[in-house]
């Protein structure tokens, strides 16, 4: 396990902003992850993250201990069930399914982040969501230790699960897919990626969609209709390609990002009456 002190998180964050963690732990196995959680649970605050792709770290950083699960890369196949550890990239999961001619996980291709984060927030795109393919999830909690929940026990909703806003930590997850045609699977994945490149500002650091989809609306469309495309604060900017994305256009700070988020929420509410809720997590002092 890698242990670092006063370590900057900005270089690891997809926003490329944020301060340092007092202690940063990067385990390379489920055993190391559980050992770290056990060691620090009664000592100080612990934050568990994946690739920091759906998270904004504040400029003052995170006090206590941050554990990154990105070192847990194990992935295995049994029949048509793939079991992936929490640090496996979602694109890697989709690619592994392709290698084994399994269909159902194509929508994951190109979604930033890890399996653990994807399960926590019920990640989805192009009509598919994690809840559609999850069979079971192996979890850890300080009270119960290691245990497993089936799909129906996961409380999946729009960008949430029973793990959201809890002290549960995803160790691994099993996914049920179906046999398919490898060429057709590959074609669908390439189609999804081409759509992402055309519609999303992948050339800039960002955390993807900043806001959840409000009932009956699309956050990006609301923001665009309020004339906020291209609006900037410091080095942060509302993408002109997709208004649902805030990009780091030029050495932005997390403070810049927070100011833009606040301005967007206030403007959209004032003009439309719709309350936008962040999809990203904001962590730190």
Image: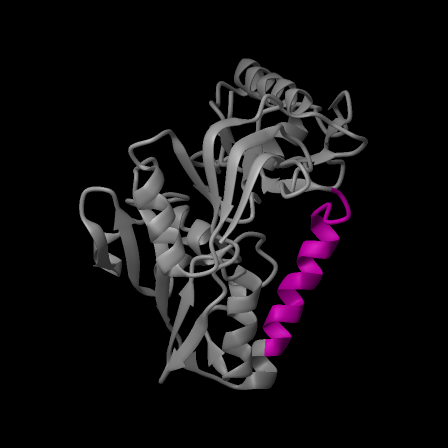
Q: Is residue 117 visible?
A: yes
- Is residue 257 shown in magenta? no
The residue depicted at 57 percent of the width and 63 percent of the height is 91
225 left or right, relative to 83: right
Residue at image position (60%, 72%) is 188
Q: Horizontal and vertical percent for residue 53?
A: 57, 44
User: Which residue ends up furthest to the left in the rendered image?
Assistant: 144
Q: Is residue 252 above or below residue 151?
A: above
Region rendered in magenta: 186-204
At x 43%, y 36%, the residue is 47
- Residue 210, can we see it? no
Vertical arrangement, residue 6 with respect to residue 274, above or below: below
Q: Residue at x 58, y 52 (%)?
A: 112
Q: How many marks?
A: 0
Name the residue furthest right: 250
The relative height of residue 189 versus residue 37 in the rendered view (above or below) is below
């Amino acid at each position: 396990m890698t242990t670092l002190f006063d370590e900057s998180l900005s270089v690891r964050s997809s926003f490329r902003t944020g301060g340092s963690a007092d202690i940063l732990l990067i385990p390379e196995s489920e055993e190391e992850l559980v050992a770290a959680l056990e060691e620090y649970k009664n000592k100080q605050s612990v934050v568990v993250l994946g690739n920091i792709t759906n998270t904004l770290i504040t400029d003052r950083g995170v006090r206590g201990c941050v554990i990154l699960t990105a070192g847990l890369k194990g992935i295995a196949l049994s029949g048509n069930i793939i079991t992936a550890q929490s640090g496996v990239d979602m694109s890697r999961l989709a690619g592994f399914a392709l290698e084994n001619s399994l269909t159902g996980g194509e929508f994951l291709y190109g979604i930033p982040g890890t399996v653990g984060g994807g399960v926590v927030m019920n990640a989805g795109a192009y009509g598919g969501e994690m809840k559609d393919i999850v069979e079971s999830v192996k979890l850890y909690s300080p009270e119960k230790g290691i245990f497993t929940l089936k799909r129906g026990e996961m409380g999946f909703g729009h960008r949430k699960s029973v793990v959201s806003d809890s002290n549960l930590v995803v160790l691994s997850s099993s996914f049920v897919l179906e046999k398919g045609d490898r060429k057709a699977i590959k074609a669908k994945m390439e189609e999804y990626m081409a759509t992402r490149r055309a519609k999303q500002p992948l050339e800039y650091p960002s955390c993807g969609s900043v806001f959840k989809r409000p009932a009956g609306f699309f956050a990006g469309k609301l923001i665009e209709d309020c004339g906020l495309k291209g609006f900037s604060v410091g080095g942060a900017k509302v993408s002109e390609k997709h208004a649902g994305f805030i990009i780091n256009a030029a050495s932005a700070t997390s403070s810049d990002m927070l100011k833009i988020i606040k301005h967007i929420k206030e403007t959209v509410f004032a003009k439309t009456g719709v309350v936008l809720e962040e999809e990203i997590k904001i962590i730190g002092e």
